Amino acid sequence: MNGAAGAVSDAHMPAKMRVEQASKIYQTKSGGVHALDNVSIDVREGEFLCLLGPSGCGKSTLLWSMAGLHGLTSGKISLGSDVINKPHPEIAMIFQEANLLPWRNLGRNIELPFEIKKQPPNRERIQKLLKRVGLEGFESKYPRELSGGMQQRASIVRSLAVDPSVLLMDEPFGALDAFTRDEMNLLIQEIWMETGKTIIFITHSIAEAVFLADRIVVMSARPGRIANIVDVDLPRPRPVKLQTTPDFLERVEAIKAMIDHRPNS
Amino acid sequence: MSDALQDKIPTFGGKGQKTEVGIAGGASALMGGPSRSAFEIAIIALVAVVIIGGAELLIRLFEVPLYIFPPPSAIGAALISEWPFLWPHLVTTICELLIGFSIGASIGFVLAAVITQFPFAEKIITPYILLLVTTPMLALVPLLVLQFGFGWEPRIIAVALASGPMVMINSATGFRRVDLAKIALAKSFGASTLQIFTKIRIPMAMPMIMVGMMIGSIFGLLTTVGAEMVGGAEGLGNRLNYYSSMIRMPQFFAVIVLLATIGITIYVIFFLIGKKWTSWES
């Protein structure tokens, strides 16, 4: 796999994951909240897709449904021929703020998925991944002894260790400082280019979405709908300094304008 | 009920969050404590020597009669000379405590784990658990003696009734500390309900479970000794009655030394377990 993967993933490629007319209504005391309203997306094989939108636009609801952790009120999500209504072994989720178990050291955190699946841990693969993200030799450390960036890198290793084909990332770098965030964005781009995974990545940062994505699904809030889908055909690998080029800033501005054009904002 | 007491007794339902803070504070005081340097340990030992030596000196200096307060040396001598007669009672007390606590703690733990899964049932049962926590189970011993006689049964039942609710109410506080993201994490890898329980919920609740075990075992010790004093033909509580009625104060205090040793041993055991299993929280 190389950088061309994103550009090649065109309309004629088969959909890796398919969201069809997904709607979700939460019942609260004050009535139903329409979190997702008739959302349909075809996720292409091997693409880097960003879900971008303000809080309350239902992007997390959508992602958790794609992980099989939430049910939909109506509509259907499928991975290949499998309907997703419970967690699927081909799909791994990366959560906000790493979500490591504080009572386990890093090594045992990474082995958790193997324990749950009752498989012997693939130590060779784990070692390779730890080395790749620069966490080699940190296996005996506890999460509280690691920085936020290191914790999130460990959680990426945990997800990749079981070799899923789809990675769902729920604002994974939102809690990190700007420098660490740039670093993590570069790392996840590299990992994506090396592994060819299909990544669906939630963010509320337009710049982050433009930097990472092949396509950006721009969502609007209340009810959560798709406002627009934007192709990002910037060449890869994208360096951090790309973010200050006029072309990049223009794309950011264009998306910002789309979001601002919502009638009641 | 004073504010301080209210802080220590967790209530279920709406105010859970607030109570949890109080309990967690208590937890760190019970389980954590500052680590001590060799110098500090030396000072603590020195203070003990000063207190014991001072007591010895003052009691001898003012010629306090033996039946009012025996000097430490007399207590030590009594402990040695009475040991052949005391140790069977010590074994009885420890066995009653261990058996009663094991029964009570197991039931309390299982009940907490199950009941926290059903918020409605939890709300219904909670007042009754609080009743068990706040009522001194010692009061039931005469009734139990009527039922079971002066054997070990009433005492073990009383110990289980005293320690079980303590374990239950603290464990329940622990089990209610659900972190949905961590449960979702386990689920996303396909975890079963049982796996979520053993790999996420129990470790998460462990600090509070340990607090419950510690408080429960100390309540158990109180109840064991009290029950032996009220309705027992054997055990260290019975010996307290016996020696005080005979005005054999050195022997009486020797029994107190044994009880204090049991109490401290309980504390140390749970301190060490807590250090191993719950250190991640500090």
Image (spheres, helix red, strand yellow):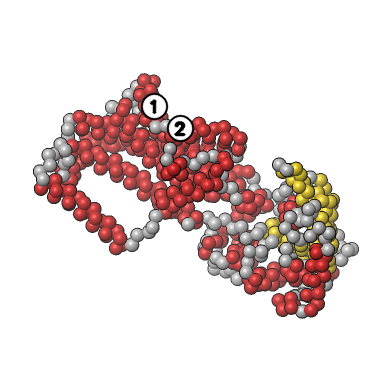
Location of mark 1 (residue): B140
The residue positioned farthest toward the right in the image shown? A12
Label 2 CA crowd tier, 10 Å (few <14, some 14–19, many 20+)? some
Label annotation for residue B132 = 2
* Three-letter amino acid code of the residue under disc 1: Leu
Q: Quadrant of residue B40?
A: bottom left
Neighbor class of circle 1 (other Cα within 10 Å; few <14, some 14-19, many 20+) is some
Element assignment for label 2: helix
From the viewer's perspective, is residue B221 above or below residue B200?
above
Q: Chain of mark 1?
A: B
Q: Quadrant of the C terminus of chain A?
A: bottom right
In the picture, measured across the screen, residue A69 lies left or right of residue B224, that is: right
Seen at 53% across and 49% down, the residue is: B203
Q: Quadrant of the N terminus of chain A?
A: bottom right
Give the x, y percent position of residue B56: 15, 48
Query: Rounded to the nearest whole Å, what is the CA distance between mark 1 and mark 2?
Result: 11 Å
Mark positioned earlier in the residue sequence (1 or 2): 2
One can see residue A203 in this view: yes
Q: Is residue A82 visible?
A: no
Which of the 4 image quadrants contains residue B75? top left
Question: Which residue: 31% across, 28% down?
Answer: B230
Question: Whole-percent x and y of residue B71?
Answer: 16, 44
